[in-house]
Amino acid sequence: MLELVAIDKTFDDQAGGHWVLADALDLRVAPGETVAVLGPSGSGKSTLLKMVAGLEPPDRGLIRFDGVDLANVVPEQRRFALMFQDFALFPHLDVRDNVAFGLVEQGLRRAQARAQADQLLAVFGLAGHARHAVWKLSGGEQQRVALARALITAPRLLLLDEPFSALDAELRASLREEFAQRIAATRITTVLVTHDEAEARAMARRGFRLLGGKLQPLW
């Protein structure tokens, strides 16, 4: 279970004022559950994910996973996967090696990592693209590669930052259904941040709006 307890986060702006991301913010996400956090641009959704991932510290409060306080746990030891809206694929690596990257970083032999990547690419319908350059793929194919790369290391938590915002409306609609099914099949705990309520409702069991530093339940 992911737990955010009484999280506070403020930023000083150039005028000397304070911008509040979180004001005693609480959130609990059960094992295997997908929760959506909605809000307009600048509301702090991405910063909230960065705090969970360990890339941005909260000013106050606790972030726990399975009862363990993460304050002193560095990002690479948290075993969380963060998937960005711009895919963040490595242009110098082919599709297979993009997917295998996390396993190689964990110390698995490259041949074994590539074999596992090939298996997952087949599941995602991308077996024929394994040796292709990622920049030659369509937007939807690149996003599937990004999700495969996120899932191959069997992360404890999946953090999705506006995962479909760079795609056209028709592709967004089809991919959100596909991703919801794939995430449900892995039973991975997931936090989705988005400005698109239809996307959030299609993918998440519970949804909240982040506004003025507070999480307001939507459903």
Image (cartoon, rainbow, N blue to C red):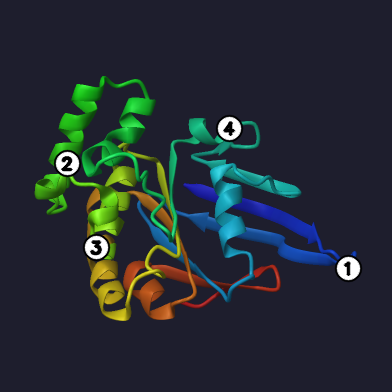
Q: Are marks 2 and 3 in contact (CB under 8 Å)?
A: no
Q: Which mark is residue 34?
A: none
Residue occupying image coordinates x 24% and y 47%: 133
- The Cα atoms of the two marked residues, 2 and 1, are separated by 51 Å
Q: Is residue 9 left or right of residue 100?
A: right
- Of mark 4 and mark 2, the one earlier in the sequence is 4
Q: Image check: 136 left or right of 87?
A: left
Which residue position holds label 2?
Answer: 131
Marked residue nearer the N-terminal end (4 or 1)? 1
User: Relative to 39, is 73 above or below?
Assistant: above
Read off the residue under disc 4.
74
Q: Residues within 10 Å of mark 4 (few under 14, many from 20)?
A: few
Compared to residue 216, the image places residue 32 above or below, namely above
At x 57% / y 64%, what residue is drawn?
A: 45
Which numbered marker is on residue 138? 3
Cα separation, mark 2 vs mark 3, equals 15 Å
Instruction: Identify which amino acid the numbered label 4 is placed on.
Output: Val
Say what amino acid the circle numbered 2 marks. Answer: Arg
Question: Comparing marks 1 and 3, which lies closer to the viewer?
Answer: 3
Residue 170 figure quarter = bottom left
**Label 3 CA crowd tier, 10 Å (few <14, some 14–19, many 20+):** few
- Residue toward you, 107 or 166: 166
Q: Amino acid at mark 1?
A: Ala
